[in-house]
Amino acid sequence: MSTQARTHSADDHRADLDFYFDPVCPFAWMTSKWVRMVAEQRDYTVDWRFISLRMINAHIDYDAHFPAGYEDGHTAGLRLLRVATRARIDYGREAVGPLYLAIGRRIFDSAPDGRPDSLTDQGSRGFLEPILLDAGLPVELVSALDDTTLDGVLRAETDEALTLTGKDVGTPILHFRPPTGVAFFGPVISRLPRPEEAVQLWDNVIGLATFPGFAELKRSLRERPQLASFGVDPEGTGIVEDWHGGSRRTKK
């Protein structure tokens, strides 16, 4: 699906921001929390769109290039995105934001001892059913976890996101003022700004994003995100790690 084709099909829900996410990405989740704070204060509309880390890395030997568990996590993300896709088809685009919110809270805002036993479980029926109820959606949507016929939609939307930014990126991808505005991988943050800081920080990002010649501001060193699932206290600071291309790949 070309960006132009998507723009025409999206005229009835044109948002101020297109936010491409994979539900198992902690940095996408952190940025989404910030975006929700800004949207509330600025009356922004956000179109929550899909990008699959499993599809991006389909050509990668996970055992050779990633730490243990990454393939299970990315596969769980793909399964959850199938459900989000089905929810969007059946219940409209407005169903995606609450579903992503419920998934993210369960995966990232719960202490490690309250999470599923494995990353694989995050793509399971038992994990998803209470989340669907929290999001106000029918539990019957769990059947979409295994519905590979939805992968075409996800692959097209993943390709759409990469068309906007180039391929050496991760998640999230944000498209500012679509369809004509610029898109970037990120912004990636490890700590959530206070409500009174959120808009000022956002305006700084917009200032860079709207300068026609701006292309990239990047570092691969990151703190572990300030999330309960990582054992990082809201007032604490996570250990610093080196991430490659938006992930903890051990090889480029």
Image (cartoon, rainbow, N blue to C red):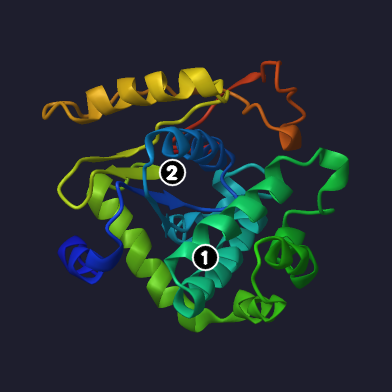
Residue nearer the viewer, 151 or 210: 210
| 131 to the left or right of 99 | right
Callout 1: helix, strand or loop?
A: helix
* Disc number for residue 95: 1
Q: State the mark number for residue 52.
A: none
- Under mark 2, the amino acid is Pro
Confirm whether residue 68 shows in the render. no
Q: Quadrant of residue 121?
A: bottom right
- Label 2 near label 1: C-beta < 8 Å? no
- Tell me residue 147's x, y (percent): 56, 81
Q: Amino acid at mark 1?
A: Ala
Residue at (31, 48) in percent of width and height: 167
Residue at x 65% of width, y 55% of height: 103
Q: Is residue 213 left or right of residue 136?
A: left
**In this view of the protein, which residue sits in the foreground, 95 or 56?**
95
User: At 67% from the left edge and 76% from the top edge, which residue is drawn?
Assistant: 138
Quarter of the picture containing the N terminus is bottom left
Nearer-the-camera pick, 212 or 87:
87
Mark 1 crowd level (few <14, some 14–19, many ≥20, 10 Å Cα): many
Task: Name the mark on residue 172.
Answer: 2
Q: Quadrant of residue 35?
A: top left
Find the distance from the CA under tag 1 to the CA under tag 2.
19 Å
The residue positioned 49% from the left and 40% from the top of the image is: 36
N-terminal of the two: label 1 or label 2? 1
Tell me where residue 77 sits by quadrant: bottom right
Q: Position of residue 174 (x, y in %)?
A: 35, 43
Image location of residue 161, percent across then percent down:
31, 54
